[in-house]
Image (cartoon, grey):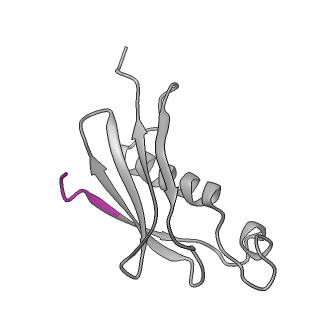
Amino acid sequence: MNAGTRLHLSLDPQRAHVDGHFDGHPIVPGAVSLLEMLHALEKHRGKPMPDGTRIRNFKCLNEFCAPYEAWVQIHSQGDQSFHLELIQNDTLLVCTDVLMPPPQ
């Protein structure tokens, strides 16, 4: 796997989904982490995900909590395949594979 691209991610702690996810222990929900990772991939590619894009092997491994700053590591596994990792303070929080359909 290549070294990839690393993009900074910073979430506003005032966002309702962070405060309300667990009372007294706010964390970022896995679905929101995935969405932010996909936005980072779109930014990296310079275009939106094509229809038919699939997510595989999505895993939440650790809590994404305050200070809500992390890195999205993007590993290209070809033109249509990527491995994404969300990392905070050298801890892997979330990982997934993104598979895009071949261009038409």
* Above or below for 100 versus 69: above
Q: Quadrant of residue 92?
A: bottom left
Q: Position of residue 86 (x, y in %)?
A: 44, 64
Which one is nearer the viewer's eye here, 87 or 104? Answer: 87
* Above or below for 52 versus 84: above
Which one is nearer the viewer's eye here, 82 or 9? Answer: 82
Q: Residue at x 39, y 60 (%)?
A: 85
Q: Position of residue 93 (x, y in %)?
A: 47, 69
* Above or below for 89 versus 48: below
Residue 1 horizontal side relative to residue 66, left or right:
left
The residue range painted magenta reads 1-6
Q: Quadrant of residue 100?
A: top left
* Above or below for 3 versus 52: below
Residue 78 horizontal side relative to residue 18, left or right:
left
Q: Residue furthest top?
A: 104
Q: Residue at x 49, y 40 (%)?
A: 55
Q: How many numbered markers are drawn?
A: 0
Q: Residue furthest left?
A: 2
Magenta-highlighted stretch: main secondary structure? loop
Q: Residue at x 47, y 29 (%)?
A: 50
Q: Position of residue 68 (x, y in %)?
A: 56, 77
Residue 84 horizontal side relative to residue 10, left or right:
left
Q: Is residue 9 magenta?
A: no
Q: Position of residue 32 (x, y in %)?
A: 63, 58
Image quadrant occupied by the C terminus:
top left
Q: Residue at x 71, y 72 (%)?
A: 18
